[in-house]
Amino acid sequence: MPLLLLGIATIVFVVSRLTPADPLVSIVGERNLNNPEVVAAAKQRWGLDESLPVQYAQYMKNLMQGDMGTSFTTRKPVFDDLVDRLPATLELTATAMVIGLVFGIGLGVLAARNRNRFIDHIARFFALIGSSLPAFWAGLLLLYVFYARLGWLPGPGRLDPRATAPDEITGFYTVDALLHGDFGGLRAALAHLILPASVLGWGVVGIVSRLVRASLLDEFSMEYVRVARAMGLRERTVVNSHALRNALLPTITIVAFTFAFLLTGAVLTETVFSWPGVGSYAVESSRNLDFPAIIGVTILGGFAFLMTNLVTDVIYAFADPRIRLT
Amino acid sequence: MIALGLITGLLVAACGSDDASPDAGTPDGSVSSSQATDDATGDSAGGGSETALVIARGMDVNSLDPQRAYCDTCQIFMTAVYETLIGLDVDNTTLVPRLATAWESNADQTEFTFTLDPTATFADGSPVMSADVKFSWERQQGLQGSASYLVGSIASIETPNDATVKVTLTAPNSAFLAQVNAPYLGIVNQELAEAHGATADPETDTAEEWFLSNSAGSGPFTLAAYTAGSELRLARNEAYWGAAPAFPEVLIKETPQAVSQRQQLEQGAVDIAMQLSADVADGLGGDDLVIEQVPSFNYVYLALSPGAVGGEQLSPEVREAIRLALDYEGLIDATVGGAGRAQASPIPNGFAGTDGLAVPAQDLDAAKQLLADAGITELTLDATYPSLNVYGVDFSTAMQKVQTDLQEVGIQLELNPVEIAVWAEQIGADGIPVTMLYFAPDHTDSSQYVQYFGLMEGTQWQGWSKADANPAEAPLLDQAFAAQDATERAALYSQLAEAMIADQIIIPVVNPDLFLASRSNITGVRYSACCNLVLAELGRS
């Protein structure tokens, strides 16, 4: 894994430095680009006056010691930035995954059990919308309806602008509020999660429901399902206790990688909802050509995918005894 | 299913609104998180100035180190936390005492002496002394931050006693007092800053990270907390030596989208939004809200670079033709829905030297004639521009309108929107024949525009446009710097404005109005030329 991460860091380092763009504009502002003293001072401070190989050697040396460098834009260590922002993204992503899984599996089962009927068509349409609707558009629409017009749900951000975040224990506002016994805070944090998590989770619903439907239909054609039905088992038992368990196996991989993708890919949702997570950090870093931050986010994304791979293998082993036996 | 989820969520939100009264603020003015849902349902916290003031803004903070900060939000922050020697009155013109009670200069504008207010203290109670001024400005010079040009003309700073600062400049500079008024020249507590690693040497200075969560100023507010991409939280300086500000706490919440700013303002979640574009501000109002449309000094301009690769045909005649071909009223309508003004020169309306300058107008026949005289029958130009939306002006919309206008006289623009980092690389290397950018003032003197846009050795646009220097401009600027009389200076800046118009390098296309939107019970909201928004002037009625 460390070698893979170093490889990722190397590729991103080289690609970002070869981009025909000038990161100094985000450091000194476009107004100072022709000011030789200011430009020279900035280059020296951020190590941009060194040759590319020297910059690379310095970066990798620091990275080996756990130092991801300092962000050009936040002026803080990138590692600290990621640690600060990861809980917000994890909280959002986890909630979105719960929404995606609960509704995705439910919808998939309904669609499979009602194949080619009205419910199946509705489920397909819903999944299609969820998978294809741009997140920023869905986000703006839901904000407009449920926040601006109806006032039923809170607006952007993890909490109301006037509210104070609970004292940090985990960085998850819901968990921290619960640990402090602040149930008002817990409700507020949950309320703020609903819209962004729904937008993010809708896409997951689309993927999961179609996958579950297809897998379940495959399972329905299997002999063991016909045997179970022939034995007079109730349809609910056949589906939930037998077919669904097997149908969920291929879903595990997709769900796991969707989770990893959302960790760094919830870019638009975080932007629309002013959610201070890794996604919005990635956007700002890219816009400002903030090299250390870009590489930091990429390493985090790579780490998330590698860990997901590992966790998926473990879950597979639990879910499918055949894998444990081999 | 999603609807079911939303309904479940709505129940959660509804439950949350039962147990928090609207005035459940804590003694320090902050509000517990449980109030969040109350505000979401439209019940503002309310209750007078003892609750926090909340501003929705797209923050562009590059640093909170007073000698490195350089951004619009930094102007608000610096004004609130680090006071300058000289302030600016509400007329946006008159300089007034702040940390300095008096100042004077010698006849040739090379020596300035400031007398400090003996009652001025930093937030930790220590007095503001001349050594702090010397340290702050020398650190600004030494670190070579983005605002260091403001102290670039300082040769030496003497402190004959604790209350006197004597500054000697390398050359006459009548703009120096206006520069001293710029928020970036706020004064920092030397002892406190040095204790946390601040030095004037970039090799040894280590204070920037400390300044991200602490402050060392004498202003009416102190920095309480800053989370990049989330919020900037200021607390009232309870030991402030001047009139105490009304609000115990001010929160600037990261809200990059104008639509979100409006929604949060309408819902009562925030008190002020001042980055609304004309289309977003349209229809905003009602008993609870006040929206004021005011002229600003910010503007967006088209820039022509005859020295850029591909810009060789941009002779003075062709540049003049481009200037005459533009439909300025149409540009203002297309970009800001008419909520803006045309601007004659690179020095914006309202600054010294702009009275009586003729506002440009479209004249297609004259433009075609100029092109014909120049032997131009067909001309295609690269128009790479940064993909920005600044002050409510979408650059793509503006450039498409420019493209349409120029087609009328036979000039084709190849529009190429790019990220600003890519744009910066290109303009610094080969240059860009036609591009678009924006400018907002750092202080109230017209010299900043000449130093940036004039065709003089070392200016930003002389470098980027690669145009020949205009030999008339440098002597005129020297005269303006040496002039003591304001009328004389204005006349010189008027000549400089005419000269820059004749250069035809910078063509202002729109000077957008600002929309200052606030809850109707918020008082003191105004646009300040130096400082954007002065938090200490705000109150709740």
Image (cartoon, coloured by chain):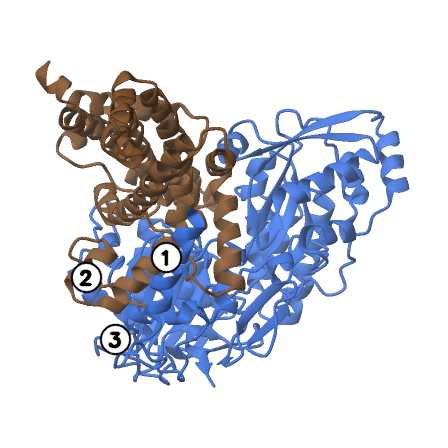
Mark 1–mark 2 distance (CA, rounded to whole Å):
19 Å
Host chain of mark 1: B
Q: Amino acid at mark 2?
A: Leu
Give the colour of chain B.
Answer: blue
Which mark is in front, 3 or 1? 1
Dot 3 alpha-carbon crowd within 10 angstroms: few under 14, some 14 to 19, many 20 or more: many
Instruction: Identify the residue at horizontal 60%, vertical 71% (top origin).
Output: B291
Instruction: Identify the residue at horizontal 80%, vertical 39% (top origin).
Output: B321
Residue tagged 2: A178
In the image, taking residue A276 as reference, residue A32 lies left or right, namely right
Q: Amino acid at mark 1?
A: Thr
Same chain shared by disc 1 and disc 2: no
Residue tagged 1: B8
Dot 2 alpha-carbon crowd within 10 angstroms: few under 14, some 14 to 19, many 20 or more: some
Residue A51 seen in the current view = no
Observer-nearest residue: A66 or B64? A66
Residue tagged 3: B123
Instruction: Identify the residue at horizontal 37%, vertical 85% (top origin).
Output: B243
- Kindly indicate whether the residue at mark 1 contacts the one at mark 3 (C-beta within 8 angstroms): no
Observer-nearest residue: B229 or B244? B229
Host chain of mark 3: B
Give the colour of chain A.
Answer: brown
Which mark is in front, 2 or 3? 2
